[in-house]
């Protein structure tokens, strides 16, 4: 679990607090991130501003800290924007025109929050576990995976895919196993669990481990739900 900073934290005090919480000595941490102990000591006492981005990333991993919060505290220590944002703007000049458009439009906080929600929603993806034998429906699943059974003219999986797309979620992955060739919808990323007879649904999910990051919905393939 990532550690969260207090509202009163500075970059240095937050690093010191996490270092102590993780039972790491100052010299040990300095060695791990490749700086002199005196440098780290000054940073923890707010005698130095936050270090460069590469060191912030190392500190995030070693101290189990939320990287975005470290970036925000680093920006505060230098009385500027967070360094990851500065780097992004510098490497993507077109973002400047977008920021100017937002400024010219005088977007309210509510409008900015709504825009953020839309951006996050567009990045949401889903991983559907559909590898099981469906043994409890044995009479119906001798030739089909359970998710391919017909419900009112559409398969269970087809209904799920429709709902995700209706919600603007188009980055969809499916873990197949039993009768995998029966699951062959277009524009889907597939992972195959070849050992579906010997392992369980949790094992199936980890066949799609490469997509398990960011905003993701992990679902069973045999459930019905609506967009609202």
Image (cartoon, grey):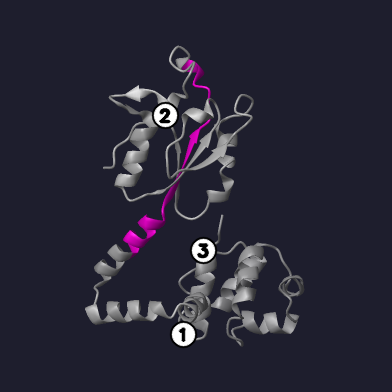
Question: Disc 2 marks which residue?
Answer: 222
Element type where label 1 sits in the image:
loop
How far separated are the C-alphas under marks 3 and 1? 21 Å
Indicate which disc residue 4 carries.
3
Q: What label sits on residue 149 in the rendered view? A: none
- Residue 119 locus on image (x, y percent): 36, 62
C-alpha gap between disc 2 and disc 1: 50 Å
Q: CA distance from mark 2 to mark 3?
A: 37 Å
Q: Residues within 10 Å of mark 1 (few under 14, many from 20)?
A: few
Closer to the observer: label 2 or label 1? Answer: 2
Question: Quick check: 40 left or right of 151?
Answer: right
Q: Nearer the viewer, mark 3 or mark 1?
A: 1
- Residue 159, magenta (yes or no): no
- Residue at 33 percent of width and 34 percent of height: 159
User: Is 125 inside the magenta-drawn segment?
Assistant: yes
Circle nearer the N terminus (2, 3): 3
* Percent coordinates x, y for residue 139 in the rendering: 45, 11
Q: Is residue 155 visible?
A: yes
Residue 9 in view (yes/no): no
How far across and down, in percent of the image, does residue 223 sit? 38, 31
Classify residue 178 by image quadrant.
Answer: top right
Which numbered tag is attached to residue 80? Answer: 1
Q: Which residues are magenta?
A: 116-136
Residue, x 34% and y 64% (percent of image)?
Answer: 116
Residue 35 is left or right of residue 209, and the answer is right
């Amino acid at each position: 679990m990532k550690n969260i900073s207090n509202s009163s934290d500075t970059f240095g005090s937050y690093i010191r607090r996490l270092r102590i919480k993780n039972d790491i000595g100052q010299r040990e941490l300095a060695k791990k991130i490749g700086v002199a102990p005196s440098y780290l000591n000054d940073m923890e006492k707010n005698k130095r501003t936050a270090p460069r981005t590469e060191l912030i990333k190392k500190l995030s991993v070693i101290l189990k800290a939320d990287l975005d919060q470290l970036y925000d505290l680093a920006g505060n220590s230098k009385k500027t924007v967070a360094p990851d944002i500065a780097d992004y703007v510098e490497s993507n000049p077109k973002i400047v025109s977008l920021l100017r458009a937002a400024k010219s439009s005088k977007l309210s906080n509510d409008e900015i929050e709504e825009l953020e929600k839309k951006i996050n929603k567009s990045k949401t993806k889903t991983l559907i576990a559909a590898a099981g034998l469906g043994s409890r429906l044995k009479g119906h699943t001798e030739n089909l995976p359970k998710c391919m059974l017909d419900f009112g003219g559409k398969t269970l999986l087809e209904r799920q895919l429709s709902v995700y797309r209706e919600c603007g979620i188009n980055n969809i992955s499916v873990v197949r196993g039993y009768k995998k060739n029966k699951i062959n919808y277009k524009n889907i990323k597939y992972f195959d669990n070849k050992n579906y007879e010997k392992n369980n649904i949790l094992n199936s999910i980890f066949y799609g481990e490469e997509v398990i990051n960011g905003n993701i919905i992990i679902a069973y393939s045999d459930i019905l739900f609506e967009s609202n």
